[in-house]
Amino acid sequence: MSAAPLSRRSLLMSSLAASTLRAEESRPNIVWIIGDDLSVEFGCYGFKGVATPNMDRFAGQGVRFAHCHTTAPICSASRSAFQTGVYQTTTRTQGHRSHRKDGYRLPESVPPGDGADA
């Protein structure tokens, strides 16, 4: 039994799907995991105190950063810099404050990132 011939529309759709797959394959697949107050307490970093088989396997399949630095020694201030791209002193978030009840807003010169320019 022979296969039915492909229509022009089928060929076009197949071509579009193939080019989309090639474009997606050329883009990196990045998952960035941030753990507050965690340090390097994973087996993939040589830590023996806890078992982290899933994270260890995940790290073995991708890129594991061995030398990382932060702009602040505390979690919320570090996240502020990571999420805005500027130092905490620029956004007045260096004091480990939540600003939940004081009406705080980022300076207009520092719009929060939405990922659109990534």
Image: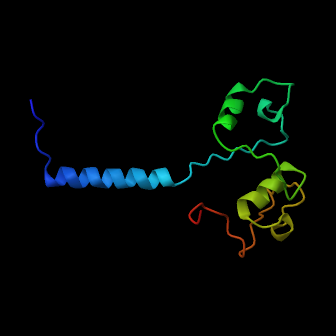
Question: Which residue is found at the position 65% from the left and 35% from the top?
Answer: 58
Question: Which residue is found at the position 67% from the left and 30% from the top?
Answer: 57
Q: Quadrant of residue 99?
A: bottom right
Image-based side of 58 in relation to 9, left or right = right
Give the colour scheme of this rendering: rainbow
Residue 116: percent from the left, percent from the top? 56, 64
Taking the image as drawn, is residue 117 in sight? yes
Residue at the far front: name it. Answer: 2
Q: How many marks?
A: 0
Question: Which residue is found at the position 71% from the left and 25% from the top?
Answer: 53
**Residue 47, placed above or below residue 113:** above
Residue 79: percent from the left, percent from the top? 77, 54
Taking the image as drawn, is residue 98 in sight? no
Residue 26: percent from the left, percent from the top? 49, 54
Quarter of the image where the N terminus is located: top left
Quarter of the image where the C terminus is located: bottom right
Image-based side of 51 in relation to 15, left or right = right
**Residue 81, placed above or below residue 36:** below
Question: Which residue is found at the position 77% from the left and 63% from the top?
Answer: 103
Residue 11: percent from the left, percent from the top? 21, 52
Q: Nearer the viewer, residue 49 or 111?
A: 49
Residue at the far bottom: name it. Answer: 109
Q: Quadrant of residue 56?
A: top right
